[in-house]
Amino acid sequence: MSPQSSTAALTVGLIDVFADTSLSGNPLAVVEDADGLSETLMRRIASEFNQAETTFVMRSSRADLKLRSFTAAGAEVGGAGHNALGAWLWLAEEGKLGPIEAPRVFRQEIGGEVLPIELRPVDGRIYGRMRQSALKLGPALADIRPLAAALGLAPDDIRAEPAPRVADTGVAHLLVHLRDTAAVDRAEPASKGLLKVLGAVFAEGCYVYAFDGSAPHRAYARFFNPTVGLWEDAATGTAAGPLGAYLESEGLISGAIEVEQGTKMGRRSILRVSLAPEPEISGAGIIVMRGRLSL
């Protein structure tokens, strides 16, 4: 039996995003030089990697590069989150962007928008700072009882201020302020119930969070996104960004916030959000695998 032949081989890898150590943060699969891939094949490759998201790097006529990202379930996701930051960190760490000896700004085409990303060296590592879109807010959720039930929580676990509502700086997510960090960890969403709540408010995912009492500019969060087949995510830049923007619009923070996410999953991630005035997400990543994908 002859060995399987392949007509193409693509450079691919796995990078832990928003991570200070390997096997933490949010893993992202990256596929380089994906211009010749059909959308169907990109979905199949994302399924093969079976990560929260796989990002495909392509040429762009509008920016330095174009990115497309798919979940393992085959849903395409937009927004400038770990899917975008991780791809740029991968390219920088692999030397594909030339020397990063001082801050450099690139332009990325993603989800129909062109957004800047800054890469800079810090203590031998590359950090990325990525701007999102201006904040758009939906109306406050009028009845929290279906939401509480969908999260497996009591209604009094949900705080009224700031009110649960959809916030969007690239992707629309429902932001829910809980009583304390213990309530965040107690959340056990029911898929059908949460899908119904998210569908009613036209949101993609649900970001539950609480404040660290000893550090008012630090939040503890978890993210659930059954609408794209992603049950829980370890680090979600497209949710942390609107959270920071929403909290600042309510006068609860000023300038910046740090979000801890993924701890309940054993994948502790730290997302840093600054408001200038649009949210900017920053963090680093660690490459944990390099390889070739044969097609």
Image (tube, grey):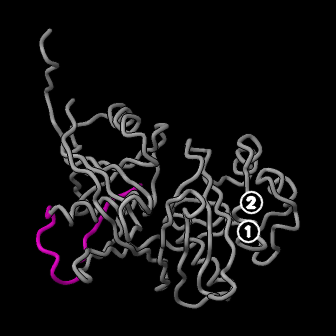
Residue situated in front as seen by the camera: 169 or 13:
13
Q: Based on the displayed image, in which of its 4 quarters is residue 16 positioned? A: bottom left
**Which residue corresponds to the image point at 49% horizontal and 78% vertical from the top-left?**
273
Q: In the rendering, at what x and y percent does residue 136 appear?
A: 60, 69
Residue 227 image label: none
Question: Farthest top residue?
Answer: 1
Cβ atoms under marks 1 and 2 closer than 8 Å: yes
**Which residue corresponds to the image point at 43% horizontal and 61% vertical from the top-left?**
24
Residue 277 versus residue 174 in the image, above or below: below
Disc 1 crowd, CA 10 A, few/some/many (<14, 14-19, 20+): few
**Which residue corresponds to the image point at 48% horizontal and 72% vertical from the top-left?**
270
The answer for how far apart the CA atoms under marks 1 and 2 are is: 6 Å
Circle 2 residue: 186
SS for callout 1: helix
**Residue 109 magenta-highlighted:** yes
Circle 1 residue: 182
Q: In the rendering, at what x and y percent does residue 255 appear?
A: 53, 89
Q: In the rendering, at what x and y percent does residue 161 appear?
A: 79, 78
Q: What residue type is labelled 1?
A: Ala
Could you tell whether 93 is left or right of 190 in the image?
Answer: left
Residue 218 versus residue 184 in the image, above or below: below
Residue 112 seen in the current view = no
Location of the C terminus (image quadrant): top left
**Residue 262 magenta-highlighted:** no
SS for callout 2: helix
Q: Which amino acid does label 2 sit on?
A: Arg
- Magenta residue span: 95-112
Majority secondary structure of the magenta segment?
loop
Residue 101 seen in the current view = yes
**Which residue corresponds to the image point at 37% horizontal and 53% vertical from the top-left?**
28
